[in-house]
Image (cartoon, rainbow, N blue to C red):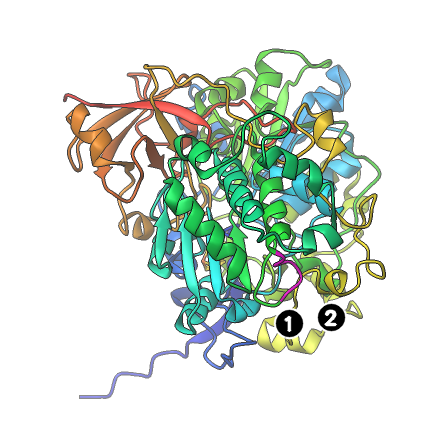
Amino acid sequence: MNDPSPAPPIERIPFTCTLDCGSRCELVACVREGRVLRVDTPADRPDTVTRPRLIPCARGRAQRRLLDIPERVKYPLRRTGPRGTGQFEVIEWDEALDTVASHLNEMRTAYGSESVLHAVGAGSITGRGFHGASAARRFFSYWGPVSEASGNESNHCAEMAAQWMLGGVVPGSDRATLLDARLIILWAMNPAETHMGPNTEYYITLARDRGARVILIDPRYTDSGILADEWIPIRPGTDAALVAALGYVMETEGLVDDFVHTHATGYEAYRRYLMGEADGVRKTPEWAQPITGVPAGTIRDLALAYATVKPAALLPGWGAQRTRFGEQIARAFITLACMSGNIGVRGGGLASVGTRSGEMGAPHLPIGPHHPSRQLSPGNWAASILDACLKPPLRMAHIVASNLINRSPDATRNAVALEALDFVVVNDQYLTPTARYADIVLPICTDLERSDLVASWGHDAHLFYSRSAIAPAGESRTDYWVFAQLAQRLGFGDAYTQGRTETEWIDQLLDSPCLERMTLENMGIMRSDGEPRVALAEFRAAPAAHPLPTRSGRIEVVSPEAEMYGLPPIPSYVADSAPMDRTYPLQLVTPHSKLRSNSCAYANPWLQQLEPHTIWINPRDATPRGIVQDAQVEVHSKRGAVIIPAKVTERIMPGVVCIYQGTWYRLAEDGQDHGGCANTLTDQVESPSGGYATHSVWVDVRRRDE
Ligand code: SF4
């Protein structure tokens, strides 16, 4: 018998996962004869404490499965049935593009360019040139001033707090500095699932191995609980009260660090608040216990630990500030770090929101002369359509890389709003709930099918050259190609492309003097590593010589800017006035899942099999309701109802339930969402300065009798 002929060689092509997950990883597509056999990691990377590998998670590795799922859009589609039903026919690219171009023209002529709602999201993100948001913004910057649905759903309140107190966003210390910490407090921080910068979990593990104590403060025992020595459950939205009680103990025990006097202003007003000199209420642990659900003894112990064990890293996640008064919580975190004196020291920590991706200096594609004339927050774009409060009113939407129905609060209202428009275009890789409401769906390439320069996430300052590994599925194209074609039809094709193809643009970007072209081409990544950076170290060492960009040059505990939004000038606790009535007695939290990034990658069957989508409910809440493990339940809020199986678990505190956000909205004939989309239950009410309040939701859970 003859030997079989040798298999064709496997090509290893570096590419980057661009999910907006809180990390950024290196991957390699193993390709044979135009097919991705598997997704791997680069084989030859050094892995040291100061230069750890950027190791992908299941979402990145499972991308191969997404190439050919039934939900993949491979050809231009035109709607043939009612919006939302998913009835489409395949049409030619020319017909699709001509239709979109003529509607854009008609809208501008009849109502003005502002009548077009342009919405972008994180569906295909962080390229320098050709991903959804960059390509689309560049297009509309030449076409005319549109209305844009954009905003910061992730950390708006934390950003406001940083602006008010620090004079701007400040990336936290490099994660490697955690190795020097003796105490790490993960306060609503869940790096096991949301990373918050690559390798955060890895460094916490190493720090614990070296003797650091790790405390988790969260309504849930998250997957990050495995990193922790202790779990302190806390009621959502009450974190500023816990901070106040910790501060009270530190103040009364004489443990407030001098840093708050030498490097901050306005502390005296906060001290008076703690001591009850302003309102007659001392913020004792006993005061905080019924508010937060944290026992007074636990509060006292935590305060003593945080004030005396040094260095101590306070690492807040962003879930806590996505609440009705999230600004107060984010401000309280910075104040507490000041009181403990752990700012600017290696192993300490500061609540941070900034990223360092811009430090590589990689250029973006240039932007044209027009800017959006109206900015609509992700929370109120639907209201703007339904209330017809804008002049001119919104008539058309061009949605790019955004599952807009799913990602904004009150999903049913969002769907109704899209239904009310004259014309909807969606650029996407998959037939998402939002794409199902489109008149035209334009099929877009995935990470494995396109090339781009991709920036890092979090505390890293890296740049990736992500390479196309296989040909685009069907007739899918990049967003850049789509908008170049539309620009051509609308008369500004040359201005948009400047005569360059995507390959030529990348070639030009790679020639930028700040980039190491050879390194990027050979390795797929350009890294900025080195001695771990300590945030605000220079400011700590010499505040006069290195002042912050605030009025005083110091950290400002009192914020007149907050008062402009009706908030107290100091970071005091403000109770959510939403009444806890008998109809909706449980608080709902809607955190990010490790199985997807918002709603991206949700449709991957491999990931869906890893963990069922459930509502977490404590046995003390489940038992009186007759709810047992895996039982189907109805979850009701003022906004809607979802059907979902129950996970009865002690991993969530009594009085609080949890549904991971990001599963796709699927409204059934019974008027209930059988997709379990968390935003079917959330409300469009925002924090005073405009932050999402998706963890300030009240619900009830009922057993569903089949
Ligand atoms: S989802 Fe995030 S952590 Fe996972 S591979 Fe992609 S970038 Fe890395």
Give left or right: position of 173 versus 684: right
- In the figure, residue 525 lies in which quadrant? bottom right
Residue 245 seen anywhere in this rendered image of the structure: yes
Residue 571, percent across and down? 62, 36
Task: Report which residue position mark 2 lands on.
Answer: 515
Q: What's the residue at 74%, 16% (across, down)?
A: 111
Residue 257, percent across and down? 63, 55
* Crowd around label 1: few <14 · some 14–19 · many ≥20 (10 Å): many
Residue 566, percent across and down? 68, 23
Q: Earlier in the sequence, mark 1 or mark 2?
A: 2
Q: Amino acid at mark 2?
A: Leu
- In the figure, residue 546 lies in which quadrant? bottom right
Is 529 a magenta residue?
no
Q: Quadrant of the N terminus?
A: bottom left
Relative to 313, residue 655 above or below: above
Answer yes or no: do the residues labelled 1 and 2 have beta carbons within 8 Å? yes
- In the figure, residue 206 lies in which quadrant? bottom left
Residue 485 seen anywhere in this rendered image of the structure: no
Dot 2: what SS? loop
Task: Report which residue position mark 1 lands on.
Answer: 526
Q: What's the residue at 37%, 58% (across, down)?
A: 228
Q: Quadrant of the C terminus?
A: top left
Relative to 100, residue 519 above or below: below
Q: CA distance from mark 1 to mark 2?
A: 8 Å
Q: What's the residue at 42%, 76% (across, down)?
A: 10
Q: Amino acid at mark 1?
A: Met
Residue 72 vs residue 257, the one in the foreground? 257
Residue 397, percent across and down? 61, 26
- Residue numbers of the magenta segment: 341-345
Residue 598 vs residue 649, the one in the foreground? 649
